[in-house]
Image (tube, helix red, strand yellow):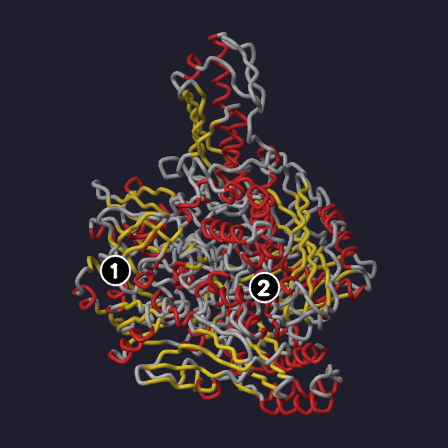
Amino acid sequence: MPVLIARRLDEALDELAAHPDTTVLAGGTDLMVELNFGRARPARVLAVDRIDELRQSAGGSRVRLGAAVTYARLLRDGAGSRALEEAARTVGSPQIRGAGTVGGNLGTCSPAGDTLPVLAALDAVVVLRSARGERRVPFAEFMTGPKRSVRRSDELIVAAEWDDAGPAQTFVKVGTRNAMVIAVASLAMVIDRARRRVGIALGSCGPTILRAPDAERFVRVLCDEAGWDRPLRLSEAERTELGRLVSAAARPIDDVRGTSAYRRHVLGVIAGRALARLGAA
Amino acid sequence: MTVAARPRLRGVVGESAPRSDAPPKTQGAFAYASDLAREGMLHGATLRSPHPRARIARIDVEAARALPGVAAVLTAADLPTKVKFGLMKLDQLPLADGRVRYAGEPVAIVAAEDPERAREAVRAVRVEYEVLPAVTDPVAALHPDAPRLHDDGNVIEDVRVVHGDPDARADVVVEDEYEVAMQDQAPLGPEAGLAIPDPDGGVTLHVATQWLHEDLRQIAACLGLPERKVRLVLAGVGGAFGAREDVTLQIHVCLLALATRRPVRIVYGREESFHGHVHRHAARLWYAHGATRDGDLVFVRASIVLDGGGYASSSSAVVANAACFGAGPYRVPNALIHAVGAYTNNPPAGAMRGFGAVQSCFAYEAQMDRLAAALGMDPVALRGRNALRDGDRIVTGQAVEGSAPVADLIRRCAALPPPAPPPGLIAGEVDLTALPGGVGNVTRGEGVRRGTALAVGFKNACYSHAFDDFSTARVRLVRERGEPVAYVLTAAAEVGQGIVGVCEQIARTELGVQRVVVETPDTSIGSAGSSSASRQTWMTGGAVLAACREVKAELARRAEAHDRVRRTPRDGEPVDVDLAPLLDPPIERTVTHRHRPTEPRDATTQNAGHVAFLFAAHRATVDVDVETGIVKVVQVATSQDVGKAINPLAVVGQLEGGIAQGLGLAVMEEVRLQGGLMRNASFTDYLLPTTLDMPPVVCDLVEHPHPDAPYGAKGVGEPPTISSTPAIVAAIRAATGRELNRVPVRPDDIVFGTAARSGWRMRPGADPRTAVRM
Amino acid sequence: MRLVVNGTPREADVREHESLLTVLRERLGLPGSKNACEQGECGSCSVLVDGELVCSCLVLAAAADGRRVETVEALGSAERPHPVQRAFVEAGAVQCGFCTPGFVVAAAALLRENPEPTDAEIREALAGNICRCTGYGTILDAVRRAARITT
């Protein structure tokens, strides 16, 4: 298992092009568990955590977040998305946040990946680069199943990009421990008042990160009625309906971390809370 | 001779003195079992059954043996004897022969040049299993038609407590069924041992264990060696909590060392640790409590089934404890408690902190709250009214001697300062870490309800029921560079609890010397018994105390003979004399200390089976997000009768640590089993409380010295895990109104309010074998 | 591979899938960092890599070539303990001690960035370190105590 530590992007892309059996190593927080337990013995490993281009971010109206930016750095420097910062704060522990990266979250593509619902709700674009060029894939098309994505073996995730959606966005994660827990269910909600756009995405509730289009439409209508630039006061009936629509969008299973019934239920609860908080802001 | 003013001794009995093993532990310099290494050492690994119940048709080790770097591959066919091991019942072979009875049972062991090779060799062993249907419901296992999992049937132990009139009637009766899930001790240090073959054909084993001599007995028998040829040395122990009471890798690593004539080390990873050691028994409990309309308990009737898993381990004593303490620390004139431990094909269960008392306390404390509700009484007042008092008899007919300050503990605990009120609905900046769900941002006050409740519990200290319980200590007082130094050797396992510090403080106090060295425990001295049953301070502390007093007596004799001192030192005073004539030669005394004998258990368990009882009360305050079912424990307050705190800070550490394990069982810790298979054998999915789950603890140490214990110091380790769990669950009930008859409480239980039902109909007090499927 | 470990350049033969933790413990004679879960869920193996607090069990050793690693062994010595180490001893924060090196490293990292943390900040900063013995009360005391010593 040769390990190549790439310092430049082109070097990494050449390696990927030459060896399609390469496993990309970012922060290591997922891959190392597989290695430690003897569950994976990759043919080759490419470490991308020292590639400068992957560690650069840009703010402004179009946000770009380098794939190798760790959660810890994202929290120190800001991410250009409040919901993403909230999600990053829930990732594992300080030690995990010191190593793990958003690019790694995208690369592993677990339905429980904490930042993924946020990227989905932001309508983020995943920037993939190969020796042949660059592809920009909307998140909705990026993830195809549990730990599956459209990334080709010669491609590297270099960044995620999205339009700054303003302050009305949040992330909520439910777990049975008060810290360091894998999501039983999670939800990201974005109300981009400027663009009159609503994004609601669910984690740990299906084979991929799921959007809740009916719920998004419902919130859009509420915002239309209340006025996009005014606070939204949610009635009890509206909150219940939103919860119902979000629960209906989920495709949860029973597993060791939670039951499908609970997942559906709790998604409804946190959706109502998220909208009440964002609407009031 | 000049008598200069000397500073008082630092670190005597009653002081919160730092312990001597703490500095190296903070520096990473303390050698745990997993840190040990020897030149030329091999690495061992274990092949375990993937099936909970199967016949082994064939094992082919040829491919594994042929791998480069593999030094040995051993199966049952290679065992030197067919002797079985077990703590209380010899029922398991070191390697499965013909049958496996739980998923994870060792089938083959290998030694190789490096751990990766060893794992490869394990994978290369081919085993043909004939898989049999697993028996995983312990109540079903007791049914006469159930498949027999062991030749002598599926009952490991059967204990009946019959007290007063077992058929007594009462004005008010409450009845329910309860469930306790399997808990893992999860000591942070994984199992590890290093075996070194000795030139005499014997073996020396460095191992992390709770009881060197009990390991020695089982190892020697299974190896077919006389006990003198097996030597054990305690390696650094990274926590135990019952998980190191049983043999895990001890026999395996010795077998491999003897087979290869090379040092062999085995270190379990976390996943293997989950499979390798026994757990806390999962339990089903059916309870009925009867009381007068005024709130005086009339009877307690209970049927208890404990899931012993594939092998017996210490199940028989756990069953006895669940029964003996099954009515709680209350005056109960009439009781009928029937507890049975069943063999199943689940992972074996054995010792864990609280040892049987935990399971029944969860049930009887829930019952006391139900009874209070039925009577329209305050639950704390109901407890106080029925609390055991000095001289009262527990349901085994044994009077509580020393003291039974139960009402006092309840009153004091209820009066401890409460936490700050809940924050309410918060807008704007908020400390999420203080709220249920933490930074998961689930609630900023929405749906949060507060609940507070109190529970009380008790159990025995030391071993019970006529077990010959003793500990041995050797104290040597020597002169080094003109200073007196006391060396203390016992076989007591320091597993984190602080027996090292207890020995240091006792020796310092008794001998009046500042420098006390507690030597590495090994089997060159007599047994100290296990670091379990809250007994080491009492037993090994007692042995050290007795040995010190003999040394002191000899010192006084020598001093008198030399007429060199004006007086012998008083407790807590430094020896301040010319030592040469007193300590050349050094003084050495070895003393074996026993507590007073206890009676064997009879058919109705009416006897003085226990040496002493430990009591504690816990009050928990929780904030529950009732819409998501997420719990934040806000505070736990405890009053515990510790007898005498040898080291108050260390006692607080035991109380807080025990409460953390009780909290874990209350709200998150469960070994999840499906068809006998463990589904969460990792720290990712077996959740342990973090800094954000464990609240501040208010500790109230109550000192009612026990006349038999050294300085009156009772054991303190277990009571914190016993009543903390029911207190927390009762607080969640208070916040949610849900029934919550099972631990750990799951978010589903709070949100949907569904109670746990076994599907078995059982009349409380009846023989659990008579359960009828509903 | 080469590392700068506790200020000293070191070379080690590394098996390709090995973690930094294994290399520290088995190849470089630094067993202070503990292996308790192998998956970053307990913090017992906490070290600083280029100044960042991480779990060394989740660092692929071969990919850490050239990095600066600080372990518990370098924080202080028996003669000159780090204030956090002193505070852990004095506060009674050490029982079995298996988690202690990880806590000491994490607490030192916290105080380096935030010399006067609030209780909530201490709890959040140490939430990745599991202790099974103490219930954390004495550990939090130790960190408060160390903060007082340091500032």
When the figure is inspected, residue B352 is found, relative to residue A242, above or below; the finding is above
Of all residues, the one furthest to the front in this rendering is A60
When the figure is inspected, residue C39 is found, relative to residue B252, above or below; the finding is below
Output the chain of dot 2.
B
The residue that label 1 is drawn on is: B110
Q: Quadrant of the C terminus of chain B?
A: bottom right
Task: Report which quarter residue A227 is drawn in.
Answer: bottom right
> Foreground residue, B733 or C102?
C102
When the figure is inspected, residue B30 is found, relative to residue B139, above or below; the finding is above
Dot 1 falls on a residue whose secondary structure is strand
The amino acid beneath tag 1 is Val
The residue that label 2 is drawn on is: B304
> Foreground residue, B280 or B207?
B207
Residue at x 36% of width, y 81% of height: A129
Residue B760, which numbered label? none
The amino acid beneath tag 2 is Ile
Q: Is residue C108 left or right of residue B299?
A: left
> Is residue B760 in view from this perspective?
no
> Foreground residue, B622 or B724?
B622
Task: Report which quarter residue C19 is drawn in.
Answer: bottom left
Percent of width and height locating residue B452 = 73, 60
> Is residue B597 in view from this perspective?
yes
Dot 2 falls on a residue whose secondary structure is strand
Q: Is residue A176 left or right of residue B702?
A: left
Looking at the image, tell me whether mark 2 or mark 1 is earlier in sequence order: 1
